[in-house]
Image (cartoon, helix red, strand yellow):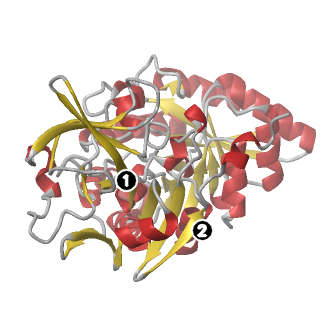
């Protein structure tokens, strides 16, 4: 699952005690494991190898340049959703042809920048966006490659409503029932070529059945279009594979592949006579980065308030907003519980019992500022270190300066070495750019 393990009474990131990182860099700090990052990417690539997919890491989940460069050097493309993410992708050294640009509200400037960079594909999410892309490409005298994001109208059975994206009423994509008609209209465009289908059903999806259902619907649409003489060359099945937060809730990558690969194998490797072979795109994000990082915080105070017990740490909702925003669970345990403490069983973390039930909270002036509620932990005292696990996805990426708090440092561990890949912000950074 990851390379954060307890040995000799303390938590290690690969071969580095996290307490050493805290002493050197301070807290709060995001600590990433390079071995975990690459291990997850390689397992996805192996699981889907029969399809020879283009794997595009979803940069929005964690866009640090060092993280992106590490994956690009491994062969990954990048999935971006804004001009800023496109800028990061290019700075990370990604081949522009392996950059895929999604998002429902691309501005004219963002489209122009992506055309200038000659990215691989625009994943368009509305009819109006497609015609705007055609217009801007015409002004620049270029041809834009595009895939249409279709909404397969699935029912949410596996994730939070705020992260499920494939119902008919969701803002993403075009209803699959309208897609065929739009493809026929789009074939008349002069400067934008619609060559593919894009699916993204949400995240984290903990079951394989929604993928099989979405892909089956997409293949029926592809056959319908083929009968009208409109070939589809690429099928982007998105990402959204689950990560481990509570225990064993995430299927292995091989399970997703077992549900998806049989539906696509012949379309990729042995298409029917006269049919265009499909090229497959994957856009994993959370499943690569979530368990590749922890957020390390230091206890500032403990407090009793009526029947509630609080552990107040120096990390807050501005550092990790997922618990407040999505009621998300993150396993939390002391980084130095001592040699006599029972090692935490993270595979059964929900049922794990410590000595005292507490809320782990931050210093922000909001009642919603918490990292965990009603969690059993060993007795904590001022100065202790707490590790918040599975923090790589949408942790630092969604952090802010609320309450004028400088954002955390980021550190990448590689074996027995570590380096700061983003310095801690200063107070001066908070007002930089203000007049």
Q: Is residue 278 visible?
A: no
For residue 10, above or below residue 432: below
Residue 140 coordinates in the image, percent (x, y): 91, 43
Would you name the residue on which mark 1 appears? 298
Question: Residue 394, percent across and down?
Answer: 46, 45
- Identify the residue at horizontal 73%, vertical 53% (top origin): 87
Q: Is residue 414 above or below residue 245?
A: below
* Mark pair 1, 2: CA separation: 30 Å
Provide the residue designation for mark 2.
69
Q: Examine the image and state in which quarter residue 327 appears.
A: top left
Relative to 304, say whether 80 is above or below: below
Point 59% across, 46% down: residue: 406
Q: Nearer the viewer, residue 30 or 2?
A: 30
Tell whether 424 sits left or right of 96. left
Q: Is residue 280 left or right of residue 305?
A: right
In the image, which is nearer the foreground, mark 1 or mark 2?
1
Looking at the image, tell me whether mark 1 or mark 2 is earlier in sequence order.
2
Q: Residues within 10 Å of mark 2 (few under 14, many from 20)?
A: many
Image quadrant containing the N terminus: bottom left
Element under disc 1:
strand
Kindly identify the residue that appears in the image at 48 percent across and 43 percent down.
Answer: 319
Q: Is residue 384 left or right of residue 339?
A: right
Classify the position of the C terminus by image quarter: top right
Q: Nearer the viewer, residue 34 or 114?
A: 34
Give percent across and percent down for residue 290: 38, 53
Q: Which mark is residue 378?
A: none
């Amino acid at each position: 699952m990851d390379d954060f393990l307890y040995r000799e009474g303390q938590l290690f990131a690969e071969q580095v005690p996290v307490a050493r990182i805290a002493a050197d860099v301070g807290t709060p700090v995001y600590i990433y494991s390079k071995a975990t990052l690459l291990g997850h990417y390689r397992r996805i690539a192996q699981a889907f190898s029969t399809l020879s997919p283009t794997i595009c890491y979803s940069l929005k989940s964690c866009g640090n340049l060092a993280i992106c460069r590490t994956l690009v050097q491994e062969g990954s493309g990048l999935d971006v959703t804004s001009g800023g993410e496109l800028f990061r992708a290019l700075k990370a050294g990604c081949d522009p042809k392996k950059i895929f640009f999604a998002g429902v509200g691309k501005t004219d400037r963002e489209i122009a920048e992506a055309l200038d960079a000659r990215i691989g594909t625009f994943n368009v999410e509305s009819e109006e966006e497609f015609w705007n892309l055609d217009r801007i490409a015409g002004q620049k005298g270029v041809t834009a490659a595009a895939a249409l994001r279709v909404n397969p109208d699935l029912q949410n059975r596996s994730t939070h409503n705020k992260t499920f994206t494939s119902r008919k009423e969701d803002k993403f994509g075009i209803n699959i029932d309208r897609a065929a008609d739009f493809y026929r209209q789009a074939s008349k465009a002069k400067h934008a070529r619609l060559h593919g289908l894009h699916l993204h059903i949400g995240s984290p999806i903990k079951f394989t059945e929604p993928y099989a259902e979405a892909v089956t619907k997409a293949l029926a649409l592809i056959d319908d279009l083929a009968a009208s003489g409109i070939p589809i060359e690429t099928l982007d099945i998105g990402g959204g594979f689950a990560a481990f937060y509570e225990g064993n809730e995430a299927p292995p990558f091989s399970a997703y592949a077992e549900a998806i690969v049989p539906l696509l194998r012949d379309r990729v490797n042995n298409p029917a006579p006269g049919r265009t072979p499909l090229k497959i795109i994957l856009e994993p994000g959370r499943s690569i980065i979530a368990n590749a990082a922890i957020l390390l915080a230091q206890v500032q105070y403990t407090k009793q308030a009526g029947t509630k017990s609080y552990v107040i740490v120096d990390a807050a909702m501005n550092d990790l907003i997922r618990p407040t925003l999505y009621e998300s669970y993150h396993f939390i345990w002391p980084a130095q519980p001592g040699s006599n403490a029972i090692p935490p069983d993270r595979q059964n973390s929900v049922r794990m019992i410590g000595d005292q039930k507490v809320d782990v909270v931050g210093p922000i002036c909001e009642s919603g500022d918490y990292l965990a509620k009603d969690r059993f932990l060993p007795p904590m005292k001022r100065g202790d270190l707490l590790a918040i696990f599975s923090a790589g996805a949408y942790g630092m990426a969604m952090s802010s300066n609320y309450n004028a708090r400088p954002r955390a440092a980021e550190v990448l561990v590689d074996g027995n070495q570590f380096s700061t890949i983003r310095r801690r912000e200063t107070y001066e950074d908070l007002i930089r750019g203000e007049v």
